[in-house]
Image: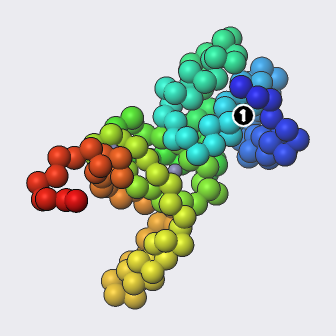
């Protein structure tokens, strides 16, 4: 795993500053966890996968610290958690707005930009007075690869 640059360090500090009651050893653990989250980028990791990533770098950090920190980050509004595919709930930074296409066959998740659903958002508001969440829409379907693997009943050429 590569080390993080200055920008990421600033971001880690900013995120940690939003957590109350940081001190000494606790901060070291939290910092490692936030770094693992940032390193994961667009990969959608669940709590167990994040814990494994943290422990690979910092074997001394307890699992309970990882889970407690994830909870604290969620309470602080830094992270949110959603069920995606088959791997259990995954974490997102709340300021990373995007939606998801989830393949029901292989579980692959594709991130799509929010502007792709902006017409739907507007229409739902206009017709139903419904305010769609800005982030974390998950649409179920079948990905390109799985579609290609399907036996075709029609005669295709
Ligand atoms: Zn698929
Ligand atoms: Zn996502």
Residue 89 percent across, percent down from the top left = 43, 40
Left or right: residue 118 compared with residue 1:
left
**Image quadrant where one finds the C terminus:** bottom left
Compared to residue 113, the image places residue 47 above or below, namely above
Question: Is residue 39 shown to the viewer in this render?
Answer: yes
Q: Which residue is mark 1?
A: 35
Compared to residue 88, the image places residue 65 above or below, namely above
Left or right: residue 92 compared with residue 14:
left
Q: Quadrant of residue 61?
A: top right
**Image quadrant where one finds the N terminus:** top right
Circle 1: element type: helix
Residue 149 percent across, percent down from the top left = 27, 44
Of all residues, the one furthest to the left in this rendering is 153
Badge 1: residue crowd in 10 Å (few <14, some 14–19, many ≥20): some
Question: Is residue 68 shown to the viewer in this render?
Answer: no
How are the colours assigned in the image? rainbow
Name the residue nearer the viewer: 110 or 32.
110
Residue 129 percent across, percent down from the top left = 38, 83
């Amino acid at each position: 795993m590569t080390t993080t640059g200055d920008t990421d360090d600033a971001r880690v500090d900013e995120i940690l500053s939003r957590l109350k009651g940081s001190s000494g050893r606790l901060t070291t653990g939290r910092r490692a966890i936030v770094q693992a989250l940032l390193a994961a980028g667009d990969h959608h990791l669940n709590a167990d996968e994040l814990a494994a990533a943290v422990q690979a770098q910092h074997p001394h950090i307890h699992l309970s610290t990882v889970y407690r920190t994830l909870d604290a980050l969620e309470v602080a509004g830094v992270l949110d958690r959603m069920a995606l595919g088959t791997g259990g709930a995954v974490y997102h930074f709340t300021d990373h707005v995007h939606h998801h296409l989830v393949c029901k066959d292989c579980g692959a998740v594709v991130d799509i930009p929010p502007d792709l659903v902006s017409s739907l958002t507007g229409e739902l508001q206009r017709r139903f007075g419904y305010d769609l969440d800005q982030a974390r829409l998950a649409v179920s379907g079948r990905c390109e690869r799985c579609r290609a693997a399907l036996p075709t009943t029609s005669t295709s050429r």
